[in-house]
Image (cartoon, rainbow, N blue to C red):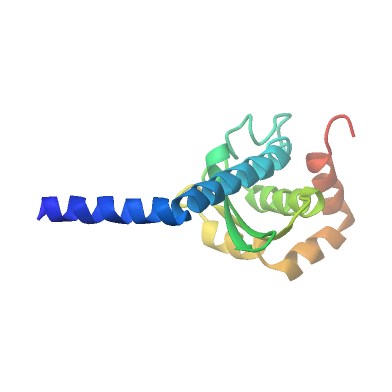
């Protein structure tokens, strides 16, 4: 049975290579990895609301927390799964809001954004995930001048 499975696998691989599909899949994968790095480069410099560190320095965001999927021609789904520093972090929603705002402002391509707290890293992750992916709540939060000022401080680059 293993011999048959190996032959089928080899045959499928060869068919994909000859048809050019394998090359297209490699190119698509590479393109998604490049987009993910582009997204990560935008969010890594966001500052923590309480500490003088960036989210990257605190390991709240890493390269591995960003996933990009192609939705259509030049349109992408961006999924970010961040990890608050402690399971009871009171600012996890604010961090999610900062991620939303910075990406909406800075990404040069059409995208849909989904931001989540990494599973098992926060005591109320489900509730926070709903909040940070609700466009109406995000818009309402940004209408609050105090909250908007905090977000601006977190997302503004040091040399802006």
Res 148 visible: yes
Of all residues shown, which one is farthest toward the front? 18
Q: How many marks?
A: 0
Measured as percent of width and height from the top left, residue 56 is found at 64, 33
4 w.r.t. 26: above or below: below
Choose between 137 and 42: the one closer to the eye.
Answer: 42
Residue at 61 percent across and 45 percent down: it is: 36
Q: Residue 63, located in which quarter of the rendered image?
A: top right
Res 118 visible: no
Choose between 64 and 17: the one closer to the eye.
Answer: 17
* Left or right: residue 81 compared with residue 20: right
Residue at 52 percent across and 41 percent down: it is: 64
In what quadrant of the picture does the N terminus appear? bottom left
Of all residues shown, which one is farthest toward the bottom? 136
Choose between 140 and 1: the one closer to the eye.
Answer: 1
Measured as percent of width and height from the top left, residue 80 is found at 59, 51
Measured as percent of width and height from the top left, residue 65 is found at 55, 44
* Left or right: residue 52 compared with residue 77: right
Residue at 67 percent across and 62 percent down: it is: 73
Measured as percent of width and height from the top left, residue 55 is found at 66, 36
In what quadrant of the picture does the C terminus appear? top right
* Left or right: residue 82 compared with residue 149: left
* Left or right: residue 13 compared with residue 139: left
Residue at 53 percent across and 57 percent down: it is: 124
109 w.r.t. 72: above or below: above
Choose between 89 and 158: the one closer to the eye.
Answer: 158
């Amino acid at each position: 049975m293993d011999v048959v499975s190996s032959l089928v696998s080899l045959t499928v691989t060869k068919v994909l290579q000859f048809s050019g599909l394998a090359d297209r899949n490699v190119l698509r994968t590479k393109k998604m990895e490049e987009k993910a790095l582009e997204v990560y480069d935008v969010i890594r410099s966001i500052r923590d609301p309480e500490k003088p560190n960036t989210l990257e320095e605190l390991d709240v965001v890493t390269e591995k927390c960003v996933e990009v999927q192609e939705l259509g021609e030049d349109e992408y789904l961006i999924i970010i799964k961040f990890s608050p520093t402690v399971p009871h972090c009171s600012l996890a929603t604010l961090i999610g809001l900062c991620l939303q705002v910075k990406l909406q402002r800075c990404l040069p391509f059409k995208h849909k954004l989904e931001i989540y707290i990494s599973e098992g890293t926060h005591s109320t992750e489900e509730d926070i995930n709903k909040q940070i992916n609700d466009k109406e709540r995000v818009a309402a939060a940004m209408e609050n001048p105090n909250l908007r000022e905090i977000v601006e401080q977190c997302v503004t680059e040091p040399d802006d």
